Amino acid sequence: MGGVNDPLASFAALRTDEGRALLESVRDVEPSRELAVATQLRREHPADLVSAALAQGRLRQRAVAKFGAADAARMFFTPHGVEQSTRTSVATHRARRFRDPAGLGGLGVRSVADLCCGIGGDAIALARAGISVLAVDRDPLTCAVARANAEALGLADLIEVREADVADVDTSPYDAVFVDPARRGGRGRIFDPEAYSPPLSWAVEAARKAPRAALKIAPGVPHDAVPEEAEAEWISDGGDVKEAVLWFGTDTPAAHRATLLPGGDTLVSPRATMLPDPGVRPVGRFLHEPDGAVIRAHLVAEVAARVEGGLIDETIAYVTSDTAVTTPYATTYEITDQLPFNVKKLKALLRERGVGVLTVKKRGSAVEPEELRRKVKPQGPGAATVFLTRVAGSPTMLVGHPHRS
């Protein structure tokens, strides 16, 4: 077996019968027991192989959040691969858009060139949607891991893994191109799209040469970096914004879309007809908190129109209304109290209401929720939500509870 400087040989050893048996034996090892387990296993197995198995076990445990327990237990990972991989729910949504012509703007795609494929998470979702995939990456170890994952999940017939520079790949035989540029460097996340690897400009040109294409980008991408003809989709999962995708060749070009998983609700507006920012109005009985994907997509005005409301402040993405109109694109709260920012008054109000379970949300406030919770010391059987925000420019506390329609 190769040493620590031979990662390909170390990975190959994990796929031997001995390596697989070791992986099975360490799958549920707690971090506190690793040293004792390693000491015991090294009596019968090479030290490098034991170390590699324990490291892979840790990666599989981390990967459960993205891939689910069943897949994570069979797949192989690298540290970078776990970090960069798409969550399965998001990858599945994107694959369905590629494949299902009757679905959400489905493109009827049957083959995809997956450029910068990483460990194969997106290729797996595409293959499970019945799409034939060419998965390309220039790193030998990453390709070996992607190939192993296709085999482990029974998808090797649909996924061809190729070690190559993406710039050298002829994508013309494929119905569509998918590009997931690396957005992390030695110093952490990369925010400049032209510092991606490959740069966003290269990915856009590759997309324009294909009949259909999707480019995965960071959700914080500047809107002026979005090509005029692309549909820009922001995707959240369970309320957390996960990614943005630039789509080429859809039936909604030059549009912004917010998609909310797991339900799949999607809000779309052509950029040319997007509503202007709603006006500021006094706080009404209801407060609507738009989903993060809606905010990133600049579709708060569309949500305000749906609930017949306005903003509480021109710089804050909270919408208020007098009527209980609900929408899947925002969480609605019923507001019972509006106070100028004053911790003592809030503490007295919560004590009077017997509030012991306090949810603290903030937009436009420097106060940390945990800090406020420590100061007010909530006690009692009741529950409430407090919003630390600004109303018409003034620091304000809004107290209420989730509205049940």
Image (cartoon, rainbow, N blue to C red):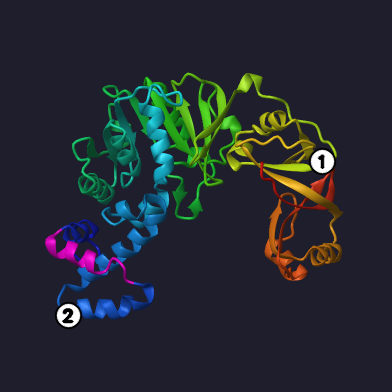
Front residue of this view, candidates 348 and 173: 348
Residue topped by disc 1: 284
Residue topped by disc 2: 43
In the image, residue 378 sits, relative to residue 72, either above or below, namely below
At label 1, the amino acid type is Gly
- Magenta region includes residue 234: no
Q: Which residues are magenta?
A: 16-29
At label 2, the amino acid type is Arg
| Residue ID at (31%, 33%) | 129
In the picture as drawn, the residue positioned furthest to the left comes out as: 17
Give the structural element (helix, strand or loop) at label 1.
loop
Comes first in the chain, label 1 or label 2: 2
Q: Quadrant of residue 132?
A: top left
Give the structural element (helix, strand or loop) at label 2.
loop
The percent position of residue 371, horizontal first and vertical second, equals 71, 66
- Magenta region includes residue 26: yes
The numbered mark at residue 144 is: none
Front residue of this view, candidates 294 and 228: 294
In the image, residue 243 sits, relative to residue 2, either above or below, namely above
Q: Is residue 86 left or right of residue 351?
A: left
Front residue of this view, candidates 354 and 159: 354
